[in-house]
């Protein structure tokens, strides 16, 4: 079994660390603040925005997973985590002569395309926000640090406790219908499952590509998604905004590379993941 360090123990990091630990791996979580309840794996408290101590954070891991989340959408928060924090973790291992592969969670927000285009790992990153720019820089830094390092780009995460679309549907929000504006989603259970899948490949020596897009197999117009949710939950059907020439259409994320590697989705469509009772 492998020794794995999980940097960041939010909802996804915690779920990943728990699953790996239950599978027999030796897992250590790294977090800035204590968890509300004792985790089923060792947890070390450290602020990665400051240099790490070799006395408190060992470097004899077989794999490091970087799955942090910013406290806010302010670009300064992303800079301190994805530049200062990532550099501190990479330097901590490099200074000790340790070279474990890294798996980093990024976001499909690195694609700023907004005309309904399909995007995949070969598409140019065109970040439309300062936060996405820091993610692009972090990806590049990670790849520069080691040829075995891998990035997975999650699209919009949903699941229990992440009910943004449900709240919009319940409020009867008016929706852009024409031209269609696409949504890209991944259920939080699939986030954990994708990471487990890629970790398994990395640990068994499979040569991975540097990057994988992880978004379910049904990028759909927001109008279709909201209409379906309203029908399932008994909400009033959405109202259509007046058609607008040149209105943004977002992009459509293609996970064909991840699918070809052998990943099987728990929730391949929003129609699988948003079934009531959603928040149970």
Image: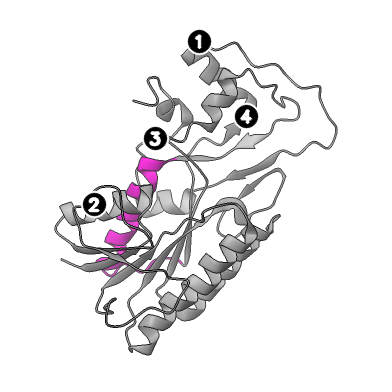
> Which residue position is annotated with label 3?
267
Please report whichever mark, 3 or 1, sits nearer to the chain's N-terminal start. Answer: 1
Alpha carbon separation for disc pair 3 and 1: 22 Å
> Which residue position is annotated with label 4?
222
Q: Is residue 108 magenta?
A: no
> Which residue position is annotated with label 1?
234
Main secondary structure found in the magenta portion: helix
Q: Is residue 39 visible?
A: yes
Few, some or many residues within 10 Å of mark 2 (<14, 14–19, 20+): some
Alpha carbon separation for disc pair 3 and 2: 21 Å
Alpha carbon separation for disc pair 1 and 4: 18 Å
Q: Which segment is the magenta one?
A: 187-209
State which quadrant residue 227 falls in: top right
Marker disc for residue 18: 2
Camera-side mark, 4 or 2? 2
Q: Is residue 251 above or below residue 76?
A: above
């Amino acid at each position: 079994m492998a020794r794995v360090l999980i940097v960041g123990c939010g909802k996804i990091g915690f779920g990943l660390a728990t699953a790996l630990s239950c599978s027999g791996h030796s897992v250590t979580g790294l977090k800035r603040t204590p968890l509300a309840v004792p985790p089923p794996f060792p947890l070390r408290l450290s602020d990665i925005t400051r240099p790490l101590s070799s006395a408190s954070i060992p470097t004899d891991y077989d794999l490091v997973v970087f799955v942090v989340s910013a406290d806010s959408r302010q670009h300064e928060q992303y800079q301190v985590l994805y530049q200062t924090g990532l550099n501190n973790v990479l330097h901590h291992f490099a200074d000790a002569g340790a070279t474990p592969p890294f798996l980093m969670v990024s976001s499909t927000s690195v694609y700023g395309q907004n005309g309904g285009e399909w995007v995949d790992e070969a598409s140019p990153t065109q970040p439309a926000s300062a936060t996405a720019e820091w993610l692009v820089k972090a990806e590049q830094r990670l790849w520069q640090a080691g040829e075995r390092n891998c990035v997975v780009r999650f699209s919009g995460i949903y699941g229990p406790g992440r009910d943004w679309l449900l709240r919009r549907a319940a409020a009867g929000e008016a929706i852009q219908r024409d031209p269609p504006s696409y949504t890209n989603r991944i259920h939080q259970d699939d986030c954990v499952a994708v990471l487990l899948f890629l970790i398994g490949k990395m640990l068994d020596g499979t040569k991975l590509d540097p990057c994988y897009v992880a978004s379910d197999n049904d990028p759909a117009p927001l109008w279709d998604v909201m209409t379906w949710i309203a029908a399932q939950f008994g909400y009033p059907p959405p109202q259509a905004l007046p058609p607008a020439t040149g209105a943004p259409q977002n992009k459509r994320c293609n996970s064909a590379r991840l699918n070809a590697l052998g990943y099987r989705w728990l929730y391949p469509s929003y129609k699988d993941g948003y079934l009531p009772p959603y928040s149970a």
